[in-house]
Amino acid sequence: MSPDPVRGNTLAVSAGQNSAFSGNGLAVASMLTWAAGFPAAEVLLQTWPPVALLTARLALAVVVMVPIWMLIDGPRRVVSARWRHAMIVGGCGIGVAMFLMIVAQKLTDPVTVAIVASCAPLMATLLELAAGTRRLRWNFALGVVVSIVGGLIATSALAPAQLGLGAACAVVSTGLFCWASMATARDFPELSRVGRTTITFVGGLLMASLLMFGSAQLGMDFMPATSFDIQQAGMLVIYALVSMGLSQVLFIASIGKLGVALSSFHINVAPFYVMLIMLVLGEEWNWTRALGAGIVAMAVILAQERRSARAA
């Protein structure tokens, strides 16, 4: 059961350590690229309705990633993939989850959404326990709690401004994303990491298109308020290809080595990475976020620590 790749001898221990090291490295890279999308989204949301931005983000990612997927896996494997299941995973876990997160931020505030997102390790752990892929040990359980505390500190979130429907949307969104990430890594073993990510993005794009069509029918804004320019194009490339496409490929690769629960610990370090990016753009250093990131790093180490008897 994950995350126990160690089985018996010294060679297995070494392999398990290498897997944990590379898995954590992939998770760090995933969160760094994901964090790059926050400043880009800040610019785009000034003129783009949320549903339109969600659809454009997924459309650009799919247009770029599908040809890459075909080159890696071949056209035959693309055609024979589990498309029906991917539409469910991508539609609910990517399309609906992203939309609910936008709605949650509209109904509450970024602090409330960040508080709920910091509980992702708990949700991911419950999913793995329900799926029977993890045995809950004291060090991992303590690591989950410490990670949540670090996430709350990193977001500087002491109490949400509003709860209610907005917080409920954030809870459902976070749970759907954790489930979709686990299903993407688990249910498409015949596909490459790029293929697993891309096929679920197609499902997400289908759902986003339906949401955009529904918005148009209800008379809501569904087109950008200004003309599309070079700056918006650059921000959209970062938001779609780097912050979502590359980040999700890295995250799925990390889940394959660590499991979704342990990989999700790294989500709580994202506010620190955002701060580093904003620091380059002229913002000030925030010691609170740095402290929160340090606590989450301790949680990751604690959750992976094995008793000396087992390691021996």
Image (tube, rainbow, N blue to C red):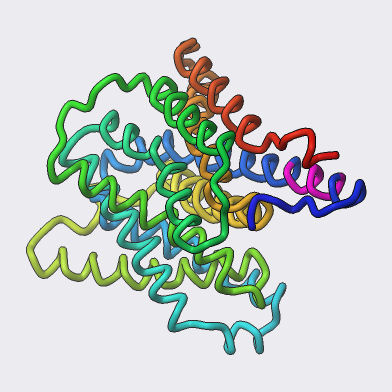
x and y percentages locating residue 159 in the rendered image: 24, 22
Between 72 and 122, the one nearer to me in the picture: 122
Asked whether residue 192 is drawn in magenta, I would say no
Quarter of the image containing the C terminus?
Answer: top right
The residue located at (18%, 43%) in the rendering is 166
Is there any visible trace of residue 64 in the rendered image?
no
Asked whether residue 15 is drawn in magenta, I would say yes
Q: Residue 154 occupies which quadrant of the picture?
A: top left
Say whether residue 155 is left or right of residue 4: left
Q: Residue 297 occupies which quadrant of the picture?
A: top right
x and y percentages locating residue 36 in the rendered image: 51, 37
Say whether residue 159 is left or right of residue 138: left
Task: State the predominant SS element of the stretch in magenta.
Answer: helix
Between 20 and 221, the one nearer to me in the picture: 20
Which region is colored magenta?
Answer: 14-20
Q: Residue 148 occupies which quadrant of the picture?
A: top left
Between 117 and 80, the one nearer to me in the picture: 117
